[in-house]
Image (tube, helix red, strand yellow):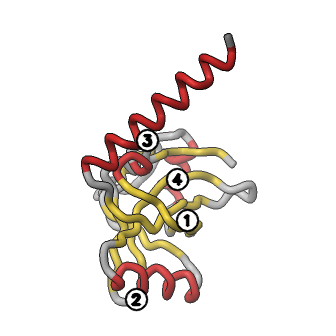
Amino acid sequence: MKIIAANNKANYNYTISNKIEAGIVLTGSEVKSLRLNTGSIRGSYIIEQNGELWLSNSYIKKYQNSSDKYYDPTRNRKLLVTKREFNKVSGSIKQGGFTIIPISLYFSNKGFAKLSCGIAKGKKKIDKRESIKQRDWNIKKLRLLKK
């Protein structure tokens, strides 16, 4: 598994309850571009339209040797999930307070581009401070145990 892009702020801004692995529909030049690690999912989000999931605002740089004249690097890309996973995601989104966020974009062992998504709930400022305190305490604890 080769990680292309990761959303590092996902764990800081959200409490992730479930993780889902989804395929992503790409063109050939986009796959070649991702093999060169020229993608980003920072600031991207997932929307539901017409019974399908779409990845919006993700950036994939144009492949240098591509013949695409009118390439849009931030176009919406379709996500491939099973019907059962889609029903689980849409049910939790409609339940209220939950959203689906991209966590990481990677190539699987078979060479397919995959997107790891999380069903998450947004953290408030107090929760973010608590997670910072917990992280700092864990670092101090490891330092004390090494001595």
Looking at the rendered structure, the kind of residue marked 4 is Leu
Residue at the image point whose x is 54% and y is 60% from the top: 116
Question: Which sits earlier in the primary sequence, circle 1 or circle 4?
Answer: 1
> Left or right of 31: which side holds 43?
left
The residue where tag 3 is placed is 64
Question: Which sits earlier in the primary sequence, circle 3 or circle 4?
Answer: 3
Where does the image place residue 10, in percent across and percent down from the top left? Answer: 41, 50
The residue where tag 1 is placed is 19
The residue where tag 4 is placed is 105
- The image shows residue 80, relative to residue 108, as above or below, that is below
Measure the alpha-carbon separation of dots 3 and 4: 21 Å
Question: Which sits earlier in the primary sequence, circle 2 or circle 1?
Answer: 1
Looking at the rendered structure, the kind of residue marked 1 is Lys
The residue where tag 2 is placed is 51
Are there few (<14), some (14-19), or many (20+) residues within 10 Å of tag 3?
A: few
Nearest the camera: 123 or 83?
Answer: 123
Residue at the image point whose x is 58% and y is 61% from the top: 114
Residue at the image point whose x is 31% and y is 73% from the top: 97
Asked if residue 144 can be seen in this view, the reply is yes
